[in-house]
Image (tube, rainbow, N blue to C red):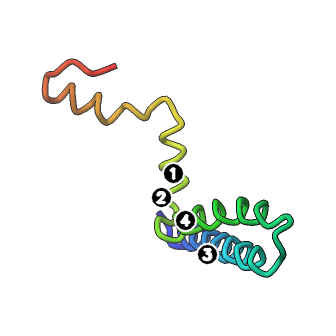
Amino acid sequence: MNRQGDRLWRGVGAFLLIAGGLAGTLTDISGPEGAGTLLLLGFPLAILGLVLVVQGKRAPLAIRVECSRHRHLPERLQARRTGRPPRG
């Protein structure tokens, strides 16, 4: 992984984390009307931002692998090495 791409993902994560925090703050400032919508949008943004800040470029790559049909490849290779039949 190159550092520039990793910094880009971490920067996007920091932006999302700040945006989610601001949405929570605006929820506190605004009255009870419409406050739930901002909080429901801000909380997932903050969580996604935190994951990107911590993991960097590895988070989108892990999601991409998990969504592909190759997600079972490591356990199948391990099963082949140990001589066990693969599960699934």
Disc sitting over residue 14 in the figure: 3
Q: Give residue 72's quadrant in the image.
A: top left
Above/below status of 52 relative to 76: below
Residue name at image x 36 percent, y 32 percent: 73
Amino acid at circle 1: Leu
Quadrant of the frame with the C terminus: top left
Residue most toward the front? 32
Q: Residue at x 66, y 63 (%)?
A: 45
Gap between marks 4 and 1 measured at Cα: 11 Å
**SS at circle 1:** helix
> Mark 4 = which residue?
52
Is residue 40 or residue 2 the one in the foreground?
40
Residue depicted at x 72% and y 78%: 22
Q: Is residue 88 above or below residue 82?
A: above
Task: Please state which of the two labelled residues, at mark 1 or mark 3, is closer to the viewer.
Answer: 3
Q: Secondary structure at mark 2?
A: helix
Measure how far apart labels 4 and 3 are at the Cα level: 8 Å
Image location (x, y in percent) of residue 78 = 22, 33
Q: Are marks 1 and 2 in contact (CB under 8 Å)?
A: yes
Question: Which residue, given by chain and number where applicable, does mark 1 sit on?
Answer: 61
Rounded to the nearest angstrom, the CA distance separating label 2 from label 4 is 8 Å
